[in-house]
Image: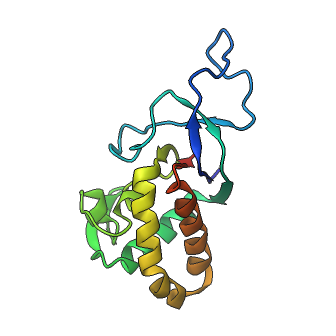
Amino acid sequence: MGLDISAYSKLVEAPDAERDEDGELVYWQGMASFFDNPDFPGRFEGLKEGMVYRIEGDCSSLSSGYGTYNGWREQLAELAGYPAEPYERHGRAQHSHCVSCWNGAAGPFAEQINFSDCEGTIGPVISAKLAKDYAEFAERAEAVGGYFWEKYQEWKGAFDLAANNGAVNFH
């Protein structure tokens, strides 16, 4: 199992999308609906819960194992300058650069660092903010290089797409 991400641009509301008797879409091709994860308020901004959207722009996807993604996200938090802070996991004390964001810190990448690693959607408003963060930190990320830089570019591309009236869907 792992984390799959789909990014979309140019979403257009399709309130008249045909549904079957169970409320499921009859035709999914070129359409999408999104989940507003209630544990992360505000991330869905710019989208409507329960709305079906017609995809009139581009799409992209990326995948990662949960552990790999969380390790990468730890590097992202370190790159952004969040200090390593203690937290408890499975009864053991550990340190993570993500802790500040988990505790509500605002700053670069905070909305992604403090977001589900398995389900939910980041809408166009927060995607635009994150796209800006990715652009501002690109030079530093490139200096890190390797796998980190490779994934950084993929995430940057996803948020760049979604900033154009789109979404980044974690599923």
Q: Nearer the viewer, residue 78 or 14?
A: 14
Question: Residue at position x 61%, y 20% from top?
Answer: 16
Question: Residue at position x 75%, y 35% from top?
Answer: 29
Q: Residue furthest top?
A: 21
Q: Is residue 72 above or below residue 116?
A: below
Query: Residue 133: x and y, percent?
Result: 41, 71
Question: Residue at position x 61%, y 68% from top?
Answer: 154
Number of marks: 0
Q: Is residue 44 above or below residue 60?
A: above
Pick the quarter of the image with the C terminus.
top right
Q: Nearer the viewer, residue 75 or 143?
A: 143
Query: Residue 155: x and y, percent?
Result: 55, 66
Q: Is residue 160 visible?
A: yes
Query: Residue 6: x and y, percent?
Result: 62, 51
Query: Residue 17: x and y, percent?
Result: 64, 23
Q: Quadrant of residue 56?
A: top right
Q: Quadrant of residue 61?
A: bottom right
Q: Is residue 119 above or below residue 80?
A: above
Q: Residue furthest bottom?
A: 143
Q: Is residue 91 above or below residue 80?
A: above
Q: Nearer the viewer, residue 102 or 9?
A: 9
Question: Residue at position x 40%, y 54% from top?
Answer: 126
